[in-house]
Structure formats: C-alpha cells, structure tokens
Amino acid sequence: MKDKVMIEFKTKYDKRIISKACKISISQILIPLIIIAIGFFCLSIVSFVQNNIISGIIWLVFAFCYIPFTYFIVLISQISKYDRLYLKENNKENQVIDTYVFQNKNIKISTDLGDKNLSRMETDYDFFVKVVETKEDFILFKRKSAIFVLPKSSITQGTLQEFEELMSKKYSENFKQR
C-alpha cells in the first residue's frame, strides 16, 4: 500500500526566510561562544595575578572581542552560503524550490532548480528533533545548528490545521507553538 500524502510545502528562498534561518542557526551556537569567552577572561585574570600584564591584556582583548567577531563571521558565512545557493538566480526558471511531503510514515524532501533536481531524500520523522510553530512559519530542527523554515503560506496540499495535528502527534512534547 502506498503511503498517503498528508501535507506538502513548496518553499522558495527569500530574504525573510534566509534571515530567520541565519538568526536561529547563530543563536544555537551562542552558549559555546560565551563559555569560550569566559575561558579567555579567566586566562586574563590568571595572567594579571601572575604580574604578566601584556599576556593579561591580550587574553582580555580576546575575551571581549571573541563573541562579536565570531558571531559576525558566522553570520556573514551563513548569508553568503544562502546567497550563493539561492539568491544569485532571480528569474523563475532558475529559482530553487524545496518540496517537503509529509506522509503517514515518512517525509520526502527534494530541492529543484527549475526542472533540474539538485537533491532528493526520504527520511523518518526522527530526522527532526523539534518543531516550533510561529505566527508565519514552522521551524523544523534537525539538530542544534540545522534548521528548516517552512512558511505557512507555502502549503500546497493539506491544511495548516492538519499539519499542526500531525506535528503534535509525531513530536508531542517537542512541538512548541509560539
């Protein structure tokens, strides 16, 4: 028996989706950045206590510059990655479209550029660890740093209510509505 298609989304990348994906991806790495910066700060204190002023100043500069610098570099790399992949080609026949088909037992995800298929995969629901519903989107978390943004307006088959029910059933405590 063929698995019945329940819900389908077709997403096109635009600046809003890319910006949201970048912000969420970067926010997921902020705690490790803070821990490393605290480590630099502790090294500066140790250096000052040992009367090694130059070393202390260097570690202190690292402590205060590390988070903004790394945050900025990661943000630029994320935006340029999406820019290279999705925004260079603005005409319709070269637009990248991601298709997500949520069936009873699995999820099919494909990426197409015009009529050329770039990737296709079929996976179980454990591929995602958490789903968050916002006012405009569903955000599916693969792991802490990988997310998929599905705008509610991109649903092409099924209803938003059916999708909410499916996500609530499949992810129970890991489905959040904001």
Image: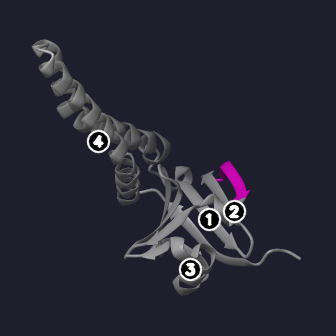
Q: Which residue is mark 3?
A: 168
Q: Is residue 168 magenta?
A: no
At 52% from the left and 82% from the top, the residue drawn is: 160
47 over 129 or under it: above or below: above
Q: CA distance from mark 1 to mark 3?
A: 17 Å
Which type of secondary structure does the marked residue at label 3 adopt?
A: helix
Which type of secondary structure does the marked residue at label 2 adopt?
A: strand
The answer to whether the residue labelled 1 contacts the one labelled 2, judged by CB atoms less than 8 Å apart, is yes
Find residue 49 and report its horizontal and vertical position in percent: 13, 21
Mark 1, residues whose alpha carbon is within 10 Å: few (<14), some, or many (≥20)?
many
Q: CA distance from mark 4 to mark 3?
A: 33 Å
The magenta stretch is: 114-122
Q: Which circle's residue, 1 or 4, is located before the other in the chain?
A: 4
Which type of secondary structure does the marked residue at label 1 adopt?
A: strand
Q: Is residue 115 magenta?
A: yes
Q: Which circle's residue, 1 or 3, is located before the other in the chain?
A: 1
